[in-house]
Image (tube, rainbow, N blue to C red):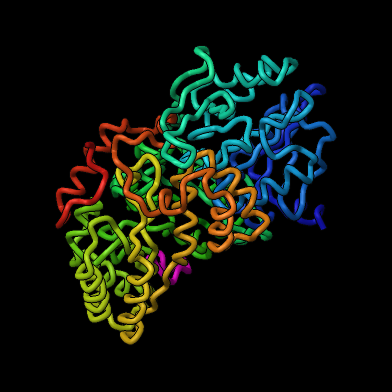
């Protein structure tokens, strides 16, 4: 079974033959192969390691793996989804490695993790990793391997202290967390000795050659897709948005120099193309790119595009997509309320949303999916009415276009101006209200699970004390009930669910990630927070410095 899965891969790079003394590495994705191989981040890191002759890399998924080394020196995990932590713990156990970093000795491999989940806030998972790579892997991965080589034959402690000197490499065990009380907020986070840096700086790759698929396979979740990253980050800077704030600055792939050659490479082996990025249509030469993909020689290409910015939906874009086998388009509108869009810094008006729908239909698309959110800080009941009215107006303006409103609950994210806000306790009721009002209108309403948003908020604002909770919930199952049960069991040993999820935190409170420096300093985030709250009808509890 395994061999046939790996045999059906078409590689777009040439692996190197490793040296005799190459470092044996296992690079794992804590989910099934079809999911892991569809992750562009995982593909790129794996290919980067496979092209080095000083590393011998084997892949590991939850269902299959390549031949694994008997004594790996490094085991890495790429994490794109929070709840996959359960699989990390299971995989470590299957390799007979203690799940807590402090229980590992000199004979055990260094366990590292990277990816969007850990870069945002690694703290709930920190005790399971020896090393966490924060930020873009382009330069960081090489720096990590090179630094490891210099201390390869030394003690674990020496290795960790050396690795901690590299910008972007975070060694959690070398930082001590103090709490106001056993079940109180964080008081301070300090390195255990003066030779360890006080702040770990997230690494940012500043080049204009972005990622592209290194493998194409029919066994991927999106079968035979070739993905290219068109832009990284997003210039819009919606106040809640991790994809924008955490990954600044906005970078665009060089069109002639890297993007078009990458697309040509991919389309030589498959006819499915995915354009990735938080705001693909904001590439300065997007029109040219579209024109390029519209050539007759690519008539059989099926094109998928990640979310596009609403006011860039032209008839031409819709036409190209329709000709390239795409039926629908996704736009994020957040809300039908102008006030809420000002609060979150979404530079968008209802007329532009309506125009996007009209253009989508005129270009031949059959469906439009809008993304909204409930529980945005500052939201009042009348804002929901405005969302309902906006959806009705879009439907009127583009009859026959199938409309879907996907809707999530606001979840605070680290390194954004809204990191101090908690989840709105009314959010679940508000999702139900939208469902009740939109369904009779023939608008497909798809709410994201409210319970899942609560778990996300917990992990998104969590500190290290959650590691004990995560070990318990792993045995209880991944429902919200399991988390509540684990909180009950650990009562008095950490704050309650309310503190992590629903509380507005005062801005002077030490955050669990305050020793990890994102792209913008806290002073800038506070300024953006003040801009947002200036539109509120009443000022939020807590938040303001006393």
Q: Is residue 537 left or right of residue 279?
A: left
Quarter-of-image position of residue 55: top right
**What's drawn in magenta, residue-wise?**
319-329
Q: Residue at x 51, y 41 (%)?
A: 211
* Near-viewer residue (290 or 26): 26
Residue 347 visible from this viewpoint:
yes
- Report the residue that reaches farthest toward the front: 492
Whether residue 367 is situated above or below residue 182 in the rendered picture: below
Quadrant in which the C terminus is drawn = top left
Quarter-of-image position of residue 367: bottom left
Measured from the top left, where is residue 385 in percent x and y? 22, 74
Q: Is residue 346 left or right of residue 254?
A: left
Measured from the top left, where is residue 106 in percent x and y? 76, 23
Residue 251 visible from this viewpoint:
no
- Report the residue that reaches farthest toward the top: 195
- Report the residue that reaches farthest toward the bottom: 440
Q: Is residue 519 left or right of residue 22?
A: left
**Residue 11 magenta-highlighted:** no
Quadrant in which the N terminus is drawn = bottom right
Q: Residue at x 62, y 35 (%)?
A: 129
Measured from the top left, where is residue 315 in percent x and y? 29, 66
Measured from the top left, where is residue 369 in percent x and y? 38, 69
Whether residue 118 is situated above or below residue 431 in the rendered picture: above
Q: How many marks?
A: 0
- Report the residue that reaches farthest toward the right: 70
């Amino acid at each position: 079974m395994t061999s046939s899965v790996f045999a059906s891969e078409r590689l777009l790079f040439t692996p190197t033959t490793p040296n005799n003394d190459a470092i044996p590495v296992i690079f794992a994705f804590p989910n099934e192969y079809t999911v892991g191989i569809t992750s562009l981040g995982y593909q790129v890191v794996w290919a980067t390691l496979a092209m080095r002759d000083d590393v011998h890399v084997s892949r590991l998924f939850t269902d299959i793996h390549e031949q694994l080394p008997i004594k790996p020196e490094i085991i890495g995990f790429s994490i794109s989804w929070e709840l996959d932590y359960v699989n990390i713990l299971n995989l470590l156990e299957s390799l007979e490695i203690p799940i807590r970093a402090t229980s590992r000795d000199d004979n055990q491999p260094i366990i590292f993790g990277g990816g969007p989940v850990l870069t945002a806030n690694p703290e709930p998972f920190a005790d399971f990793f020896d090393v966490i790579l924060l930020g873009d892997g382009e330069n960081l991965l090489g720096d990590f391997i090179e630094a490891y080589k210099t201390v390869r034959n030394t003690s674990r402690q020496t290795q960790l202290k050396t690795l901690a000197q590299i910008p972007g490499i975070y060694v959690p065990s070398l930082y001590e967390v103090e709490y106001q009380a056993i079940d109180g907020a964080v008081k301070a986070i300090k390195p255990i000795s003066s030779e360890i840096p006080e702040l770990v700086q997230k690494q940012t790759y500043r080049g204009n050659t972005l990622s592209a698929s290194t493998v194409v396979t029919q066994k991927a979740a999106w079968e035979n897709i070739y993905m290219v990253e068109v832009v990284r980050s997003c210039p819009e800077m919606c106040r809640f948005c991790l994809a924008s704030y955490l990954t600044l600055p906005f970078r665009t792939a060089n069109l002639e120099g890297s993007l078009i050659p990458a697309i040509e490479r991919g389309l030589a082996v498959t006819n499915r193309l995915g354009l990735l990025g938080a705001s693909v249509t904001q590439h300065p030469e997007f029109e040219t790119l579209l024109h390029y993909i519209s050539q007759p020689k690519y008539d059989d290409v099926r094109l998928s595009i990640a979310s596009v910015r609403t006011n860039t939906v032209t008839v031409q874009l819709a036409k190209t997509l329709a000709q390239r086998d795409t039926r629908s388009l996704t736009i994020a509108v957040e809300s039908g309320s102008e006030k809420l869009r000002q609060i979150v810094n979404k530079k968008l008006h209802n007329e532009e949303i309506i125009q996007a729908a009209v253009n989508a239909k005129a270009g031949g698309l059959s469906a439009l999916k809008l993304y909204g959110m409930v529980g945005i800080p500052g939201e009042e009941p009348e804002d929901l009415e405005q969302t309902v009215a906006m959806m009705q107006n879009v439907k009127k303006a583009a009859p026959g276009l199938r409309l879907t409103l996907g809707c999530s609950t606001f979840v605070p994210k680290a390194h954004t101006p809204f990191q101090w806000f908690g989840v709105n306790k009314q959010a679940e009721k508000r999702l139900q209200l939208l469902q009740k009002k939109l369904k009779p209108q023939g608008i497909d309403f798809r709410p994201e699970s409210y319970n899942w948003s609560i778990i996300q908020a917990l992990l998104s604002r969590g500190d290290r004390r959650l590691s004990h909770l995560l070990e318990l919930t792993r045995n209880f199952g991944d429902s919200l009930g399991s988390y509540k049960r684990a909180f009950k069991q650990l009562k008095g040993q950490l704050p309650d669910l309310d503190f992590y999820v629903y509380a507005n935190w005062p801005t002077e409170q030490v955050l669990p990630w305050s020793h990890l420096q994102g792209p913008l300093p806290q002073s800038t985030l506070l300024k953006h927070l003040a801009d947002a709250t200036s539109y509120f009808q009443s000022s939020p509890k807590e938040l303001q410095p006393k």
